Amino acid sequence: MPWWSWVVIWVVLVLGLLGMLAFFAWSLFRKVMAAGREAAALIAKADILSQRSADMRYAEFHSAVFADADVLRAEREQAVADRQVARQARRDRRVKRGKILVNADPLRYSYLNRRT
């Protein structure tokens, strides 16, 4: 093999290496740019969330240890009464729905029994 064939082989190998490095650099650049765009979108969404979280501040915590027992008892009884009212309303809606289903007109669904 002549000496110049080794030069050609090494030139082809170096050009292939440079081409491969250029391809990987371009691919990495595109991924970094896409990550930057996503980071900018994430920062924008985080700003919106931080603005909205300022509106949802919680009421300051007051320990019940130092509150009046009669007031706490009244609040507790009111909460229990509210839950009972809500439970009774759910029960009434369920009974009403059940009565509608039980008293449904069976001929209304006669097309389901028809044979074709």
Image (cartoon, rainbow, N blue to C red):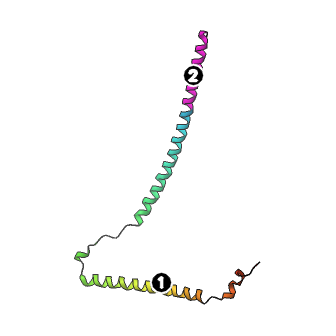
Residue 24 sits inside the magenta stretch: no
The crowding category of the residue bearing disc 2, from other C-alpha atoms within 10 Å (few below 14, some 14 to 19, many at least 20), is few
Q: Which residues are magenta?
A: 1-22
Residue under label 2: 13
Residue 8 sits inside the magenta stretch: yes
| Mark 1 residue type | Arg
Q: Residue at x 58, y 23 (%)?
A: 15
For residue 18, above or below residue 7: below
Q: Residue furthest left?
A: 66
Q: Is residue 80 left or right of residue 8?
A: left
Q: Which mark is residue 90?
A: 1
Residue 8 lies in quadrant: top right
Q: Quadrant of the C terminus?
A: bottom right
Of residue 86 and residue 57, the one placed in the foreground of this image is 86
Q: Secondary structure at mark 1?
A: helix
Q: Is residue 55 left or right of residue 9?
A: left
How many numbered markers are drawn?
2
| Mark 2 residue type | Leu
Q: Main secondary structure of the magenta part?
A: helix
Q: Position of residue 2 (x, y in %)?
A: 61, 9
Q: Residue at x 24, y 82 (%)?
A: 69
Q: Position of residue 102 (x, y in %)?
A: 59, 88
